[in-house]
Image: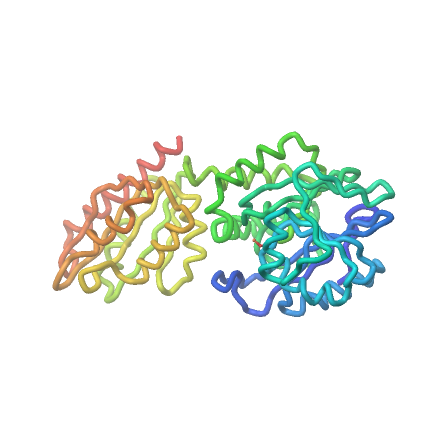
């Protein structure tokens, strides 16, 4: 693949990570993820964001640069919007290829370059409003957007083209094929990237939603012709679309979220699973969309994405040795870290020789600002009365989320 020309003098180079690794070492990426970098050529040349030495990404970038043509050695400036190693892991080796490069990052970014890569020379701190004049009409303006995703993060804006290089912000999972721009995507592709943007947001960015809203507000007066993130597609035709999506995603943290319900369940011998069907029937009787995830069979990444956007949550799990079914404990830990807050919640499950899951569940979710409806618990195999109560609770929760979101 060649470098993609965005406008005169500005190119996208990028690599897809499709080697089966997990993102951040924990999030499945079965459809890959792209690491995008951008070249801005004036009289001087800047590269915006780098890659990690991952799935041959540096070699891929090198080959694409050659199609411009450009070599690593000819780059004058390296702008590091964000120091997380997916964008900087190859930094040390890059400097060996180009020892004269000057690096620009925020003050905190400069500190992280030292910590991660031992870089202390030819690096300078920039702050909001600082401009790097590349000559020939190309000017880069920096804007700090702390905590989108790490505290040192900034975005870079090229004035003449009005392109915003947003790094993680407005990014997505999913490899990039021949279609790089939003206007080249089919409806099906857009649906794919919507899902992968949401999952990326819930997995990576959700904790920092307050900062996402602050950043969007900070950038609101900027005339943006295109958004070029470091993961995902370039928004050329409709950059407002991804800003609006990210605004919606960020808003879900404090609500209102969508009138949907995400069910996360696990069952040892099928006694909890049997009642799951009654709960789902109850939810569906109110025509509320329901997303169902079984653990530990399925990775938490997908449940997290659906839970993030849903106003209602259901947990189906038995008691396990006086406590909750352990795979749900992990889900709740992740939900706590990722700020799955302000939800309407129902829990059901069986117990055998001792209860205890409900008490454990309430203690572990105390700080999540959840509103509970009465649980349904039973000993052994559920009878008709339990099924009926579970059906009614599913219905009750569905009604509640419809009211909450209307
Ligand atoms: Fe794509 Fe937070 O790194």
Q: Against 2, is 308 above or below?
A: above
User: Which quarter is ligand 1 in?
Assistant: bottom right
Q: Residue at x 24, y 50 (%)?
A: 363
Comparing 237 with 19, the one in front is 19
Residue 34: x, y in percent? 63, 58
Q: Is residue 220 above or below residue 125?
A: above
Q: Quadrant of residue 75?
A: bottom right
- Which quadrant of the rendered structure holds the C terminus? top left
Residue appearing at x 49%, y 44% in the figure: 208
Q: Nearer the viewer, residue 99 or 79?
A: 99
- Say if residue 48 shows up in the picture: yes
In this rendered view, identify the residue nearer to me: 229 or 386. 229
Instruction: Tell me residue 321's x, y (percent).
Output: 19, 64
- Relative image position of residue 77 (x, y in whole percent): 76, 53
- In x, y percent, where is residue 365? 29, 48
Furthest residue in direction front, as rendered = 121
Looking at the rendered image, the quarter that the N terminus falls into is bottom right
Residue 254: name its quadrant.
top left
Q: Report the residue at 24% width, 48% height from top.
A: 362
């Amino acid at each position: 693949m060649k470098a993609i020309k965005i406008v005169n003098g500005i190119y996208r180079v990028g690599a897809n990570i499709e080697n089966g690794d997990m993102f951040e070492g924990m999030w499945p990426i079965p459809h890959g993820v792209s690491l995008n970098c951008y070249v801005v050529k004036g009289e001087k040349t800047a590269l915006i964001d780098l890659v990690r030495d991952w799935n041959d990404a540096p070699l891929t970038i090198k080959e694409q640069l050659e199609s411009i043509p450009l070599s690593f050695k000819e780059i004058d400036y390296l702008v590091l919007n964000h120091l997380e190693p997916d964008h900087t892991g190859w930094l040390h080796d890059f400097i060996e290829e180009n020892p004269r490069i000057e690096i620009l990052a925020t003050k905190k970014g400069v500190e992280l370059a030292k910590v991660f890569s031992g870089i202390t020379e030819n690096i300078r701190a920039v702050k909001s409003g600082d401009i790097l004049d590349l000559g020939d009409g190309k000017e880069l303006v920096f804007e700090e957007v702390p905590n989108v995703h790490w505290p040192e993060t900034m975005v870079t804006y090229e004035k003449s083209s009005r392109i915003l290089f947003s790094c993680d912000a407005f990014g997505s999972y999913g490899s990039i094929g021949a279609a790089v721009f939003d206007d080249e995507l089919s409806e099906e592709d857009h649906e794919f990237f919507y899902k992968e943007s949401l999952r990326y947001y819930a997995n990576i960015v959700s904790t920092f939603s307050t900062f996402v809203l602050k950043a969007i507000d900070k950038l609101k007066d900027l005339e943006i012709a295109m958004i070029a993130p470091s993961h995902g597609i370039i928004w050329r035709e409709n950059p407002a679309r991804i800003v609006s999506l990210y605004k919606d995603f960020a808003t879900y943290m404090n609500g209102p979220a969508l009138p949907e319900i995400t069910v996360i369940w696990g069952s040892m011998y099928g006694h909890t699973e049997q009642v799951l069907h009654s709960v789902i029937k109850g939810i569906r009787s109110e025509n509320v969309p329901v997303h169902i995830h079984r653990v530990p069979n399925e990775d938490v990444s997908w449940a997290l994405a659906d839970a993030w956007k849903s106003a209602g949550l259901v947990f189906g799990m038995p008691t396990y040795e006086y406590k909750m079914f352990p795979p749900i404990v992990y889900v709740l830990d992740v939900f706590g870290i990722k700020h799955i807050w302000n939800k309407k919640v129902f829990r059901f499950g069986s117990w055998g020789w001792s209860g205890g899951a409900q008490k454990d569940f309430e203690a572990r979710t105390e700080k999540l600002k959840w509103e509970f409806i009465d649980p349904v618990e039973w000993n052994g195999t559920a009878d008709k009365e339990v099924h009926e109560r579970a059906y009614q609770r599913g219905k009750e929760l569905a009604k509640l989320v419809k009211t909450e979101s209307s």
